[in-house]
Amino acid sequence: MEIVLPDKSYEIIVKRHAIDSVGECIASLWQNKKIAIISDEHVFPLYGDKIQQQLTDYEVCHYTVPAGESSKSLEMANRLYDFLAEQQFTRSDAIIALGGGVVGDLASFVASTYMRGIAFVQIPTSLLAQVDSSIGGKTAVNSSKAKNMIGTFAQPDGVLIDPETLTTLPELRVREGIAEIIKCGAISDASLWKDLEKLTGIQDLLAHSEAIILKALQVKKTVVEEDEFDNGSRLLLNFGHTIGHAIENTAGYGTISHGEAVAIGMVKISQSAEEKKLSPAGITEKISAMNQKYQLPTRYQPWEAEKFYNAITHDKKARGNSLNIVLLKEIGQAYIKKIKLTEIKDFLIEGK
């Protein structure tokens, strides 16, 4: 699969045991570079040595960050800048992001800003990163006010996805990735939704992960190629995320996973839209049932509408005094509705 953009194109390789061919992949992209592998304390011990052993033609170093959302910060980015400077990295050198969404977002943000930008490759090892955050060129760290508040658009030189890495994930991390797959089916691919209905559960999905990942990636590829900088159709990928990010923020980053928050957000925004006749009757039940099938939550407690509203006003999707929210016309077809920020409160009130 290839992402084709006006200023850059790159390949996405989805293949079991792809980790074993990292050296071949990197050699096709880069020569005469220093490479920094940025990973976390859980992932690097699993794959770091195997990757380094394949990069004998390069000067390679590595930096491991603590696992978890707290590492996605300006403070950690600054530590990485210092590390790269100490290793005498220049604009001709490169980074490999090896890990889940946190590592991918952090390492790509650092790559896009160190010396005004150096090359990087994504090797996502979590399901969420494989189907969503590793492609498309969004990089970010969190601020105290909002998730992903500080970031850039920077495309990788390539993405290498090995579904075998999913076998080492805790089930929680698998579930949160499934939330993004459910989202892809809901907004754009009714056949993917039907596939999810036919599968018996998490283990069956993992057995068919290569095909499922490719279908989810096709959804993202299409909208990224249409709207690289998130001003139009790419906003559809934010289904469930407006409320989801607010849940993450108010709960405290890392308290509830991104995927769980998105799952709840998809249900809540659909429930409110259904009540307002903006989405068809029964759509909320379909999403709730799919979440429950894959052991994802459908509600969050305590539900505090005012706190969520305050978090949403800092959301990146806000434009002036308005907000673009994503709603469903039906499973497989979404649309964007622009509403005033003050009106979002009405979507957050429980029990209407």
Image: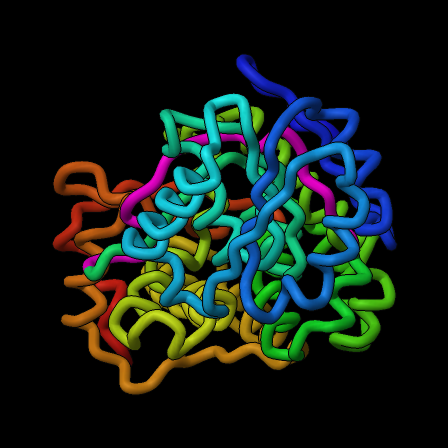
Q: Is residue 17 left or right of residue 285?
A: right
Residue 202 lies, in percent from the top left, at: 74, 75
Q: Is residue 225 left or right of residue 229?
A: right
Q: What residue range appears in magenta?
A: 145-162
> Does residue 186 appear in the picture of this structure?
no
Q: Quadrant of the C terminus?
A: bottom left
The residue under the point 64% across, 21% down is 9
In front of the other: 292 or 28? 28
Q: Quadrant of residue 135?
A: top right
Q: Position of residue 253 (x, y in %)?
A: 34, 70
Q: Quick check: 170 above or below 196?
A: below
- Residue 34, picture quadrant: top right
In the depicted view, which residue is nearer to us: 323 or 330? 323
Of residue 273 and residue 5, the one placed in the foreground of this image is 5
On whether residue 154 falls in the magenta region, the answer is: yes
Rendered position, 351 above or below 62: below
Q: Considering the image in quadrants, where does the N terminus appear?
A: top right
Q: Is residue 148 magenta?
A: yes
Asked whether residue 219 appears in the rendered view, the answer is yes
What residue lies at 62% left-to-right and 32% top-to-bottom? Answer: 222
Q: How many marks?
A: 0
**Image location (x, y in percent) of residue 100:** 58, 59
Tell me residue 192's x, y (percent). 73, 53
Task: Depth check: give the residue in front, 187 or 167.
Answer: 167
Residue located at (12% from left, 54% from top)? 342
**Residue that lies at the very extreme toward the top in this rendered image:** 6
Color scheme of the displayed model: rainbow
Q: Is residue 84 left or right of residue 206?
A: left
Q: Which residue is painted at 85% across and 50% down in the image?
A: 20
